[in-house]
């Protein structure tokens, strides 16, 4: 049953990724903010997070308060790319520069594709914390936090209650 469950989730993850890649760019940016809110950042969408993606956004697609009071913010870069069109180190450095312009200490870079090894190394060695989320991690988080999917059925597997018979 566990194997079947993993197969169902893998299929769901691929379906989610296909839908995200087919949706408009602004949908992807709103999705990321919605996911972060479902994960407990900020509070509510009206108060805590907003998608900024537009022309002249200074390389930042969204911002979300890290806590309910808005004492700290996380800036978001979202790249909706096809599989195989991986993010390189230049995009990470550009985002780092955008974080500097916003006087931000941390950022989240999300893509529907993957990050090259050199992009991962670049993010690791920069002076600001940049967390990288690839397409696989994104769909795992979406499934875990019920974003873009919902529980269809619940199975209860029961066994003998040994304490009952003692």
Image (cartoon, grey):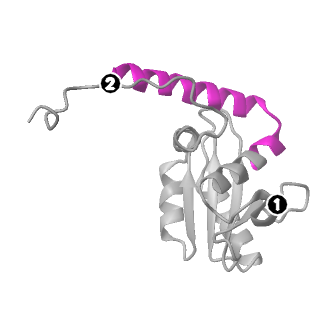
Residue at (63% x, 62% y) in the render:
41
Dominant secondary structure (helix, strand or loop) of the stretch shown in magenta = helix
Find the magenta span and give its range. 1-29
x, y (%) of residue 101? 77, 76
Residue 23 in magenta stretch = yes
Q: How many marks?
A: 2
Instruction: Check disc 2: other Cα within 10 Å, few if <14, some if 14-19, many if 20+.
Output: few
Image quadrant occupied by the N terminus: top left
x, y (%) of residue 166? 8, 36
Residue at (90% x, 62% y) in the render:
56
The answer to whether any part of residue 59 appears in the image is: yes
Furthest residue in direction left, as rendered: 166
Q: Secondary structure at mark 1?
A: helix
Is 53 located above or below residue 73 in the figure? above
| Mark with earlier residue (1, 2) | 1
Q: CA distance from mark 1 to mark 2?
A: 40 Å
Res 67 label: none
The quarter of the picture where residue 70 lies is: bottom right
x, y (%) of residue 99? 70, 72
Res 46 label: 1
Is 4 located above or below residue 127 in the figure? above
Callout 1–callout 2 Cβ contact below 8 Å: no
The answer to whether any part of residue 60 appears in the image is: no
Q: Which residue is mark 2?
A: 157
């Amino acid at each position: 049953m566990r194997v079947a469950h993993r197969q169902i989730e893998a299929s769901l993850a691929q379906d989610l990724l296909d839908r995200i890649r087919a949706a408009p760019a602004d949908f992807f940016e709103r999705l990321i903010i919605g996911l972060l809110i479902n994960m407990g950042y900020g509070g509510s969408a009206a108060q805590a997070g907003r998608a900024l993606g537009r022309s002249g956004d200074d390389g930042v697609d969204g911002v979300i308060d890290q806590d309910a009071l808005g004492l700290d913010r996380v800036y978001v870069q979202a790249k909706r790319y096809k599989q195989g069109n991986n993010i390189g180190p230049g995009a990470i450095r550009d985002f780092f520069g955008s974080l500097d312009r916003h006087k931000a200490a941390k950022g989240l870079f999300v893509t529907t594709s993957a990050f090259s090894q050199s992009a991962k190394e670049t993010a690791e060695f920069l002076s600001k914390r940049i967390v990288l989320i690839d397409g696989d991690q994104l769909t795992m988080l979406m499934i875990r936090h019920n974003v873009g999917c919902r529980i269809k059925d619940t199975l209860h597997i029961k066994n003998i209650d040994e304490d009952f018979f003692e």
